[in-house]
Amino acid sequence: MSGFTTYLKSIKRSFKLKNFIMYFILAFVIILFGTLNSVTGLKRSTVTLLEQMSYSMIMALSLSLVVGFLGELSLGHAGFMSLGAFLGGYMQTYLYPSLTAGAPLLSLVLSMLIGGLIAAAFGFVIGLPALRLKGDYLAIVTLAFGEIVKVIFTNVKFYALDGRLLSTTVGVLKTGRYDQKSLFIIGFIVVLLTMIFIQNFIKSKHGNAVMAIRDNEIAARAMGVNVTFYKLLVFVISAFFAGLAGVLYSNASHNINAADFDYNYSINFLVMVVLGGMGNLNGSILAAALISFLNNKLQTILTGDMAGFKNLFYALILILIVIYNNAPKLRGFRAKYNLRNLFNFVKAKLTKLFTKKQPVPDPAAEVEYGADWDKIPTKIEMDALLSTDFTPDNTYVPDKADKPKEGGKE
Amino acid sequence: MEETDITLNDPSLPDDEKAIGNDIVLRTENLGISFGGLKAASDVNLTIYKGQLYGLIGPNGAGKTTIFNLLTGVYKPTFGRFYLCGEDLTGFSQMAINRKGVARTFQNIRLFNNMSVIKNVLVSLSHLPEYKNTFFDAVFRTPRHYKVEKAMRHRAKEILEIFGLLEERNGLASNLPYGKQRKLEIARALASNPKLLLLDEPAAGMNPQETEELMETIRFVRDKFDVTILLIEHDMKLVSGICEEITVLNFGQVLAQGQVKDVLADPEVIKAYLGG
């Protein structure tokens, strides 16, 4: 029992608002939209948006682990998602009928695990060159990986076990579909679990080792960090969650097209990570919500020939962030206008609002402090002071201090 | 392990060093490496006893840092072997050598700049047997995670306090002033509980007063952590001030070896340093 209380205490001690606030926000979102959904029912477009947000958040978190914490650029993250979507979704078409009633949730969870594990296996394979390649070269490998996966799936026809075609079009798979109305709730619960998993991983000795590799690989090796292990581990974890997001995607869109998981889609997630701030999980989640919202709205606004402009926005956002973060001339601007200052400003205002107003001190009743600049003796006075012999009948009285100073404030 | 070390029977050695003769921390046997046709180091024989402060000096390009890189596993030696406390570590990886008990600092400071000061130390602590929370513990926040994490943070704080870095522990390592960054490097190296500490030009870029302070720190570290120190330095004041024995390298070969006074008076050494 006492062990349990100390455990609770240590959790309480490690509590930091910065780390936990996103859990509360996500829980709040789940409860709010869950109740709204069951009471009044949500619009179809809102549900779609929420689904998109949930898998984008998982993707942003998983990519943030590679880009923000390991410091390696991955341009093929949509490839992992594609693997999860196709293979996990494919498994689901078998699992769903083979399980009895009440099993859609179980089949979803199982297929998410399977999709995640398959993607994780490929993450391990991609992690292997990451041990020898760095920076741009590794980025090219991941880019190629994403394209390879895309090309393979665009040329594959999916057959069911009994030999019947699952989809007549090449590169398109009709997957199982979880209940339309509540998929987003499952999605957000998975986001919450992903967030907890990744945050706990990062804020431990393992996370320290990963960040040490990012900051200085040579020093990390010399300090006994197992660079090989941690690089592979990060790629595997990241790919696992990407595959899991892929299964959610396949459930949300029902008809998945391999050509959708292209280079632009990977860049889409990269923009989320960069916009959220490198190595900032909360930021990644918020940016994922924002970008998928923009994405959704732009899709409805920009139709026909204008549809191509959608990608322009990502490029613009990316360029603006890079300029904001790195331009030397904006240093002063950055120091003045940033989220931290905004947060502190809001916090100050809020504390002012919620704390009791202190009685305003009466200026007349203000006590004058001894340490006033007027009263501090000058060097000459000080010398005089020090040279005076203090005998009982020879006491030195500083005369200037009591005089009101002319030209002062009073 | 090998008891046939000739220095043990050397009559010229003072008695107290004979007494600690069994505690050889580092011994290299004809250690060397060649890059293509260039022999960056060859036939380097060092014997360093427990608790010794050993200096490695030489003109620029003499191969001092190469020796460090060989001893820490950055390069694999082409010739020769080296032993730590009798154990042959030739050909081990950097990670393995660090875990066997060799820690180093770098000539150009290599801290984990975007991490806090205390995390720099925690990284180095992370492979100690006491820091045993596994991946599972970390992700699921088991009671053991909190217990171990607290103990290790306490230990890191103790180490930081010794180096006067406790106040800055939550700041970024890159925000520390130069002298403190050097100190943090030493603190980080010591955190992994090494038997042998390699300091690569610890006084580089320091003013005389800071160097003085550093000398005190190095001596203190040696006594407090019970560690043997091998250091590369150009500052002769520091070398003659704290080192007990030195080896002079020139063009990758040992020029002179022995007590500081004798070596620095060696005409060959003077010639190598001043030219001519």
Image (tube, rainbow, N blue to C red):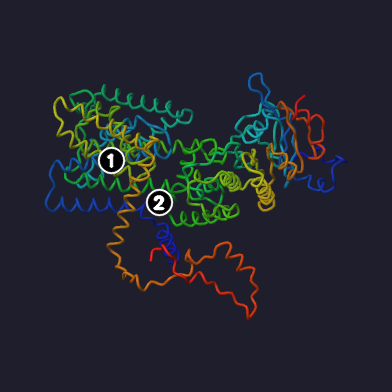
Can residue B39 be seen in this snapshot? yes
Which one is in front, B2 or A295? A295
Furthest-right residue in this view: B11
Q: What residue would you read off at disc 1?
A: A288
Q: What residue would you read off at disc 2?
A: B140
The image quadrant of residue B10 is top right
Amino acid type at image mark 2? Phe
Question: Does residue B265 lie above or below A378 as drawn?
Answer: above
Residue A348: x and y in percent read 32, 57
Residue A137: x and y in percent read 43, 25
The quarter of the picture where the N terminus of chain B appears is top right
Q: Is residue A293 left or right of residue B266?
A: left
Q: Determine if marks 1 and 2 fall on one subunit.
A: no
Question: Does residue A114 lie above or below A169 as drawn?
Answer: below
Callout 1: helix, strand or loop? helix
**Whole-number angstrom distance, CA of label 1 to CA of label 2:** 25 Å
